[in-house]
């Protein structure tokens, strides 16, 4: 659940806030009071229940394991001399025998408290959702290595903000690696440190920094594929994970700033065989450049080719398979778990339909979730697994809100 900046500043339009924040890759600020004064009571309007995420639809249960990664090729100017860029990442994968393994939280406990408190949802901390992932469960072996997709979150967000999509892909046989971009995220490190977003001009938090993180994570995927443990503390990995990933079938996707980073990394790194941007503004300095002959798909909401010059300028760079779809009624903050979680939050706080729609748009939340489960899976199935379906051929009666942009 990513809290939109315009909740606390209704005098600013959604587009003006996003545009100003993202023009140079800056972080989108979180609201200081997202149980907002205009939205209803400061306290829950009814006795709340635990928030839930929709279950994945694939045939396999899901396992997950965190990794602490240190990129010794990149010093960290914020951490000081002798310190290098460090990231938390999480691998999601099809699992077996999950019964005795604990269910993973949506965000690690300390980071969750910081995130919900900053967002103004402190009352909901005990009600945070759980995921479908089982921590440390053994990987399900199928006789063939798993295709891999890496994920980049949005500005001032967290690596779990698209868990619905991530665990959907894992349940269908993908290994998905989510990245927590340090200094622009809420996360927890193994030594107990809780990281929160920083407003520091020296912090490596521009889209190009996110893209460098993704490329480093690809290096770590190659280590896992070769049977080596990239975790900085050499913590034990789930049975079957080493040697089970396929470095020849790697893709990437990201939301918002992470979508821009995905485009940047895909342009720069041929190891990414297919890239997917979820409403990425494509704003970088210098601008994105070069030509891409590998498949790339854009699922746009507010940052469209018709309204944003940077998105329009990116489209001609795509010289291979390309597709741009848009769900009518979707907002920038419709992407990811917001569509599943904010309707529940609205009920807890007594928001009106209009107040909820100002956050996540007018697209039906149930259809939005189904779109997020179906279209990324169809894209990566076609371009990483060569499983040709028909969902990406044109409009589908199963998803009437989705339009194909020429």
Image (cartoon, helix red, strand yellow):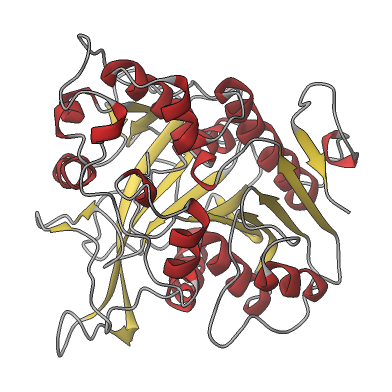
Left or right placement of residue 117 versus residue 172 in this view:
left
Above/below status of 311 relative to 3:
below
Left or right placement of residue 321 versus residue 285 in this view:
right
Residue at 26% x, 68% y is: 183
Depth check, front residue: 200 or 150: 200
Q: Position of residue 235 (x, y in %)?
A: 24, 54
Quadrant of the rendered image containing residue 160: top left
Above/below status of 177 relative to 77:
above
The N terminus - image quarter:
top left
Q: Position of residue 199 (x, y in %)?
A: 23, 71
Residue at 70% x, 61% y is: 307
Q: Position of residue 288 (x, y in %)?
A: 64, 80
Quadrant of the rendered image containing residue 185: bottom left
**Visible in this render: residue 24?**
yes
**Visible in this render: residue 35?**
no
The C terminus - image quarter:
bottom right
Left or right placement of residue 16 versus residue 376 in this view:
left
């Amino acid at each position: 659940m990513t809290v939109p900046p315009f909740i606390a500043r209704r005098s600013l339009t959604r587009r003006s806030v996003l545009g100003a924040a993202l023009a140079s890759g800056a972080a989108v600020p979180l609201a200081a009071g997202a149980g907002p004064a205009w939205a209803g009571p400061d306290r829950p309007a009814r006795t709340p229940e635990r928030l839930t995420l929709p279950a994945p639809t694939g045939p396999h249960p899901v396992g997950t394991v965190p990794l602490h990664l240190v990129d010794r090729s990149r010093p960290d100017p914020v951490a000081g001399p002798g310190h290098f860029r460090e990231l938390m990442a999480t691998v999601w994968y099809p699992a077996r025998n999950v019964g005795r393994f604990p269910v993973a939280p949506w965000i690690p406990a300390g980071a969750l408290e910081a995130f919900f408190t900053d967002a103004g949802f402190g009352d909901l901390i005990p009600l945070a959702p759980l995921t479908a992932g089982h921590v440390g469960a053994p990987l399900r072996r199928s006789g063939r290595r798993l295709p891999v997709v890496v994920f980049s979150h949005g500005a001032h967000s967290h690596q779990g903000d698209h868990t619905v999509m991530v665990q959907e892909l894992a349940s269908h046989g993908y290994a998905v690696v989510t990245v927590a971009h340090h200094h622009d995220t809420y996360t927890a490190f193994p030594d107990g440190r809780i990281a929160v977003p920083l407003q520091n001009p020296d912090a490596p938090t521009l889209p190009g920094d996110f893209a460098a993180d993704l490329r480093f994570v690809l290096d770590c995927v190659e280590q896992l594929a070769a049977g080596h443990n990239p975790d900085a503390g050499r913590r034990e990995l789930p049975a079957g994970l080493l040697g089970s990933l396929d470095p020849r079938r790697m893709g990437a996707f990201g939301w918002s700033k992470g979508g821009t980073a995905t485009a940047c990394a895909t342009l720069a790194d041929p190891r990414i065989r297919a890239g997917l941007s979820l409403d990425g503004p494509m704003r970088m300095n210098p601008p994105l450049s070069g030509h891409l002959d590998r498949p790339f798909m854009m699922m746009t909401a507010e940052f469209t080719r018709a309204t944003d010059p940077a998105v329009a300028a990116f489209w001609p760079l795509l010289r291979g398979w390309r597709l741009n779809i848009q769900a009518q009624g979707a907002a920038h903050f419709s992407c990811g778990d917001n569509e599943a979680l904010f309707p529940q939050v609205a009920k807890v706080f007594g928001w009106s339909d209009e107040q909820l729609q100002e956050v996540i748009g007018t697209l039906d939340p149930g259809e939005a979730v189904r779109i997020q489960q179906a279209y990324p899976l169809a894209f990566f199935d076609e371009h990483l697994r060569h499983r040709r379906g028909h969902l990406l051929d044109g409009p589908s009666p199963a998803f009437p809100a989705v339009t194909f942009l020429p």
